Amino acid sequence: MLNHPPPHTLQWLSLCTLLSVCCWNKAACSPGEGREIWQQPKPDPIKAQSFLHDTFPSGFLWGSGTSAFQTEGAWDQEGKGASIWDHFTHSSVSGDLATEAPNVASDGYTHWEEDVKALELLGVRSYSFSLSWPRLFPDGNARSQPNRAAVEHYSRLIERLLEKKIEPIVTLHHWDLPQALQERYGGWKNDTLVGLFEEYAAFCFHTFGSRVRYWLTMHNPYLVAVQGYGTGVHAPGETGGPSASLIVAHNLIRAHAKAWHTYNTHFRPTQRGKVSIVLGSHWIEPQSGQATAANVELCQESIEAVLGWFSNPIFGDGDYPVSFRSKHGALLPTFTPEEKLWVQKTADFFALSFGPYNLRLGRTLIQYGQTVTPDLRRMLSWIKLEYGDLSVLVAEGGWFSEAGVGREDTVSIYLMKSFINQVLQAIKFDGVQVFGYVAWSLVDGFEWNYGYTVRRGLFYIDFSQSNPTRTPKTSALYYKRVVADNGFLKGETSSEVKGRFPCDFHWGIADSTLQFTDPHLYSWNLTGDGSLRPVPGVKLRIRPAQCTDYLAIRGHLRLFASTGASHYRFALNWSLILPHGDLSQVNSEALRYYRCVLTELKKLNLEAVVILYYPTHRAPNLGLPVQIHASGGWLNHSTVEAFQEYAALCYEQLGPWVGYWITINEPNRLVDVYSDGKEKHQAAHNLLLAHAKAWRSYEKGQYREQRGMVSLALHADWAEPANPFLDSHTAAAQRFLLFELGRFLDPLLGTRYEEKHSEGGYPQEMKAYLEARARVMGLPESPLPSFTDTEKEELRGALNFIALNHFTTRLVSPYPHTQAGSQQKKQPPDHDCLTLSDPTWPSSSLGQAIVPWGLRSILNWVSHRYGDALPIIVTASGVDDQAPGEDKLRQHYLRSYLQESLKARQLDGVNLQGFYMWKLQDRHVPQFGLFTSTHHQSKAKASVAVYREIITHSGFPEDDTALTCRFSELHERCSVCAWMLKNKTMLFFGGCLLITAVMLAALVISVIVAKRNQARGGGRRTDRMHRRRRREGVPVFLCPPVVKCKR
C-alpha cells in the first residue's frame, strides 16, 4: 500500500508546490475571476448567436465514451462481484428500477469487438471507457488477487483500440463501487476508502498504464455525493442529507488526490501519461439577463456549489470556495494547510462533464433564482477565467432522447451540433485550450435512475434481443461527418457576392391595413418651435379615418419616402369600405381617404401596392364584414361573389392610382384558424376561387385603361428536412411546401414539369397523399374539394406575378404517430408534418430564426416548379428587434437576406423583381418597425440608413458607387414637384404677377402697333390723292430741296 506522505515530506512538498503553482498560474495565488463572465458587456446579438463555420485544431481528439455498469452487462459472469448499482437495481430500494435491472444492458462485455467497429465507423481517435472495480476485484480489495478474466478482457480491448489507432481514455471509477466495500465500510462515507482506492488505482496504473496515456480517476463525483448519499436517487440510495454528501465529497477529493500522487511519483516517469478527474456542472445566467452585482454573485455561488465544490480544491487554492464554506459552516469537513497544498493541482488537465444530469439537477437544487441554460461555451470560458489557461477535455458531451425515438434521433443531432459548435467558439473566440471532445455515449445503455426510458447512445440497442446489435442512429452519421470534416466547413452560402439589382427592381416597404386614428388632442406652437404636442390626459373619440387626416398621411408617407424605397404595400379595410359586405352601403368617405393616400404617393412619385383583403387571423370576424362572417365566411361560396363585387368597386374607385394589386394576403395562413381538416380545405378552395374571380374582373374591366398587375400573396417560409439522413424527412419537407404553396399556385400556374395545364387543379402529389391518408383513416373520400371544368378554366393563368412573404426557415419532420391502441393527444395536420427549429440558428426575441439562405432556397423552389415567365416579388420580409434605435439584428437581417436575394437573381437566374421590408413603423413597443412609434416621435432606427444605402447602390456593387437609374431621375423631378407644392402660395402670387405683366406688355405692344398702322394709313391716302390729280391735269407742287449755301 502506498501510504500518505509523512509530515516532513509534506513540508517539502508544500514549499515546492507553492512555488511552482505561483509561477505556473497566477489564478491559484489569487481569487478566481470567473464572475467576470457575467460582467462582460453583452456581445453583438448576431455574433453571440451565429454558428461558426471553422475547423478544430489539428490533432483534435475526437471520441466517444461509455461506462462499465451502463453497458457491460454480464453482471455476475466470469467472477464479477456485485456493485452498489447491482444491489440498488435488484432491491426494493430503487423502486421502479427493480423490474429493469441492467443484467445484460447492451452486453458490451461480450460484444466489445462490435463496439470497436462502431468507433471505427465514426472515425474517432479516442474511446473513453471505465474499468469495473468489482469485476477486477469482487471484494474491492486490490491487495487480493485480481479477477484474471477481467484483466484479460480489458487488456484485449486496449490492445484492439491501439491496433485501430484509437486512444484509450480510461476511467477508474464510474459510480459502480463494489458492494462489499459499501457493506463493510459504509462506502464513501468512510475515509478508509481513500486508501483502498489508491491501491486499486495503483494496480490499474501498473497493469494497463504502459498502454494508456489518459487516465480519469472518477466520473462526476458531485452526483455520487449528492444523489447517492444525500437524496438517495442513485446507488447506494442513502438519504443522509447535506452532511453525508459533504463527507462523501471530501473523501472522494482526497481519494482522487492520492491516486494522482501515486501516478505522479511511481508511474509518470516511465509511462508519461496524464491523470485528471471528470467534474460535472450546469450553467447559469442572471435572472432576466440583469447582471447586477447581486445576481452575478448568485450565479457564481451556484457554479461554486457544484463545480467549484470539487474544482476549487484541485485547480484553485486547495480549499473549498468561500461561499461554499460560508453556506455549510461546521458541517463542512476541512483541509489542513498541508492537505490543501497536497490536494492542489492534482490534475494534468481539466476534464468536464456537461450533460443532462447536472443540468436537470441544476434546475431544482442550485438555481438560486437564476436561469439554468445549456451553454457549454460560457462554461468553458468560466473555467479559463477562474483557474487559468488549462488544457481542457470535454469528457462527456451530449443529451438524451426518449426511448421511443429509436434510430431517428433528430433532436439529438441539433443538440450535438450546438454543443460541439460552442466548443469550437470557445477555442476560436475565447482562447480556451480544449484538446478533445467525447460524445456521450457510444451505445444505448442503462441510464441510472431513468433506466431504459431514455437513450443517449450514438448506436441503437434493442434491449429485447438476447444478442443485441449496434445500429447507427442518425446522430452517429452526423457525428461521423463532423469528425471527418474536423469541424464545420464553410458552405457556398457563406460567401458574399457583388452585384446590382436592376433599375426596375421594387425597393419596398410593407404594412398591414392602413388607417390613421389618433385620439390625442394637440396644442400647436406651444414652445415657439412650430411643433404639435399632445395635451396630457385628454383623449378624443376615435372616428373613422378621413381626408382631414392629411397631415398624418403626409407625415407617414414622408417617413416612407425618407427610406429611399420606391414601392409602398398597404391594405384596404374591406369591412370599413363595405360595412354590410355588399354595395347596399358604400363608405364613400373611406374610399376618399384611400384616394388621398394614393394621390399623395403619386405626388411623391412612389408606387402603391394595394391589398384588397388582409385577414386578421383571429376572431371575431377574420377581417371580414360582420354579415359575411356571420353567414359562414370563407366556408360559404357566397363570400366568393361578395369578394368579386368588393374588388370591382376598389378597381373602379382606386385603380387609376394603383399599379399592383394583391387580392388576398396569406390565404395559406388564414386557413390555419380552422381546426377541422375538411373546413380548412374548403376555406382554401373558396379563397382561391375568390382570387380568380377578382383577377378576371380586373382583366375584363379595368386592365385596358389602368394596366395594373394582380396577384395574391402567400406566406412562404422555407422547409428544410429536419434530418438530412432520412428520406422520410425530405419527403415531409416537400409535402409541407406543396400544402403551403403548391395548393394555391398549382391551380393558377400549373407546373413546368407537366403538359401545359394538362389537368389543372391541386398538386397531383397532394391529391394522392390525401386520398391514401383517407383510406388509412377509414374515411369515405379525400377531404380535398374538386374544381369544376369552368372553375379550372377561370383559375388558369390568373396571376400576373408571384408574391411571397418570407420571414424564416423551418425544420420539417414527419408527424410522430403514436403506436396502435394508444391515444393521440392532438390531431395531426393533413400534411402530417411537424415543424421545429435549429437551436444553432440566431433568433429574435420572439423566436424567429434568422436563416438567410432559406430565402434563396424558397425562391429557387418556386422558380424550378413554376418557371421564370412570371416575376417573383418578396412582398414582405422582416424581423422583430427590441432595440429602440441601434437595431443590429434587423441590420444584419437586411444585409444577409438581400445578399441571398442577389444570389438567387445573379447565380441561380431567378426572375426576382422586388423585396419589401416589413414594416414601416412600430405601433407601440419596438418590434418590426423601421421607425419608432408615434408615441416615441417616429424616430428612424439605424436599419433605415442601411436600407437606404443598399437602395442607393442598387445592391452590393464592386465599386460601391451609386447607380444612376431612371428611377433616381424621377425622384429628382419629384423633389422639384415637392418644392413647388411647398411654395404653392408664393408660386401662385408670382404667377399672377407674371400674367399681369404679360397682359400689360401685350396691351402696350398692341397700342403701339395700332398707332403705327394708323400713321402708315395716312401716308398712303396722300399718295393716292396726288396720283388722282395728275390724271386730272391738276399741277402738283413739290417741296424744293433744301440747298445749303456757301459763304
Image (tube, grey):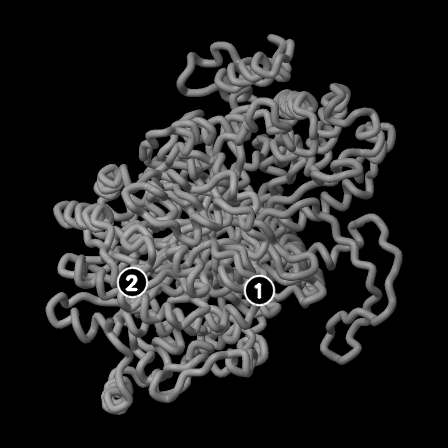
Residue at (33% x, 30% y) in the render: 467
Q: Nearer the viewer, residue 626 or 72?
A: 72
The percent coordinates of residue 860 (x first, y second) are 40, 34
Q: Is residue 165 above or below residue 277?
A: above
The outermost residue toward the left is 270
SS label for mark 1:
loop
Instruction: Indicate the position of residue 805 as horizontal and vertical percent values.
Output: 55, 40
Q: Residue at x 80, y 38 (%)?
A: 620
Image vertical order of residue 407 relative to residue 48, above or below:
above
Taking depth in this image into account, of 447 and 472 the one nearest to the observer is: 447
Q: Say above or below: 80 vs 319.
A: above
Quadrant of the rendering where the N terminus is positioned:
bottom left
Pointer 1: what residue? 365
Rendered residue at 24%/48% (across/down)? 150
816 over 784 or under it: above or below? below
Mark number, residue 216: 2
Crowding at dot 1, Cα within 10 Å, few <14 / some 14-19 / many 20+, comes out as few
Amino acid type of disc 1?
Answer: Leu
Q: Tell me the SS state at disc 2.
A: strand
Tag in front: 2 or 1: 2
- Of the residues under marks 2 and 1, which one precedes in the sequence? 2
Q: In the rendered image, which quarter is residue 643 located in?
A: top right
- Residue 385, quarter of picture: bottom left
- Give the residue displayed 41% in from the left and 37% down from the top: 723
Q: Residues within 10 Å of mark 2 (few under 14, many from 20)?
A: many
